[in-house]
Amino acid sequence: MSLVDISHQLWPGMPKIPILPEVERHQVASIADGAPLNISAITLALHVGTHIDAPAHAVDGAKTIDELPIERFAGTAVVAKVDRKPGEEITVDDVLAGGPAPQRGEFLLVATGWSDKFLSPDYADHPSLSPELATWCVEQGVPFVGVDMITPDLPVHRRGEGFDFPVHRTLLGAEVLIAENLTNLDAVAGQRIHVHAHPLAIRGGDAGPARVVAETGADR
C-alpha cells in the first residue's frame, strides 16, 4: 500500500479565483519574541485550494459541509486520464476511455494534468466537464466527482451572460459532492484507488478545505 497526497498546500498569495480574498497567515504568538509557544492564524475563503463543495454551495437550503455523514468523504474511486484543451468539454466517452468505468457508489476523479499549471495564469483557462457528463454521473450513482482544475464548470472568462453553473447545479443538486483543485492525479491516473477526502467540518459551511489522499495497492 502507498499513499499519494493529491491536495495542494495552503499559503499566503496562493492562486485563487479573483473574487475571493487573499489567503493570510499571521503570527499570534512567537517563541522568538518570548512566548512559551508558537501560534499562528489563517484567514481562508472556503473555496481556495483543495476543497470539497457541499450541496449548499449551489442549492440554497441544501446540506452544508458539517451536515454530511463522514462516510461521504472516503471510498473507492476511478481516476480517468483525459486530454482536453482550454475551453473544451470533457465527455462521457473521454472518461470511459481514460480509466475503469465507475461502478455505482464509486467516486470519479478526472485527471487533466491542469494542476501542473497551478502557479501559472494558464491555470485559469482550463477544460470543463460537459453538462451531459454531470448528468451521467448522477444517473450512474457516482456520489463524488473530483477535478484537478479550479472548477468543473467553464472558466470564468468563457462564461456568457446568465451563466448558471450547470455542472455544479446538476451534481450538487443531486448531492454529488465536488472536489476542486486536486493535484498529482497523474500518479494514479487510469487506476481504481481508495480516496480519503475529509474536509473541515465548518458549521454552515458551503465547502470545506481538505487534505485529500489517494491510497493505492491495498486490497479492496
Image: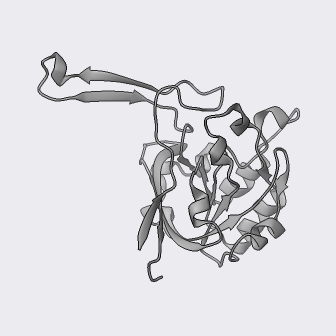
Classify 60 as above or below 119: below
- Is 2 displayed left or right of 6 in the figure? left
Residue 201 percent coordinates (x, y): 41, 48
Image quadrant holding the N terminus, namely bottom left
Rendered image coloring scheme? one colour
Give 174 or 181, whichever is nearer the viewer.
Answer: 181
Looking at the image, can residue 102 be seen? yes
Looking at the image, can residue 61 be seen? no
Residue closest to the far right: 160
Residue 45 percent coordinates (x, y): 52, 32
Residue 10 percent coordinates (x, y): 46, 37
Residue 165 location, quadrant: top right
Classify 105 as above or below 50: below
Give 144 or 114, whichever is nearer the viewer.
Answer: 114
Instruction: Say which residue appears at 72% left-offset and 66% top-offset.
Output: 137
Residue 27 location, quadrant: top left
Classify 147 as above or below 29: below
Residue 190 percent coordinates (x, y): 65, 71
Instruction: Say which residue appears at 22% left-offset and 22% top-offset.
Output: 29
Classify 110 as above or below 151: below
Instruction: Say which residue appears at 80% left-offset and 66% top-offset.
Output: 94
Give 163 or 193, whichever is nearer the viewer.
Answer: 193
Residue closest to the far top: 33
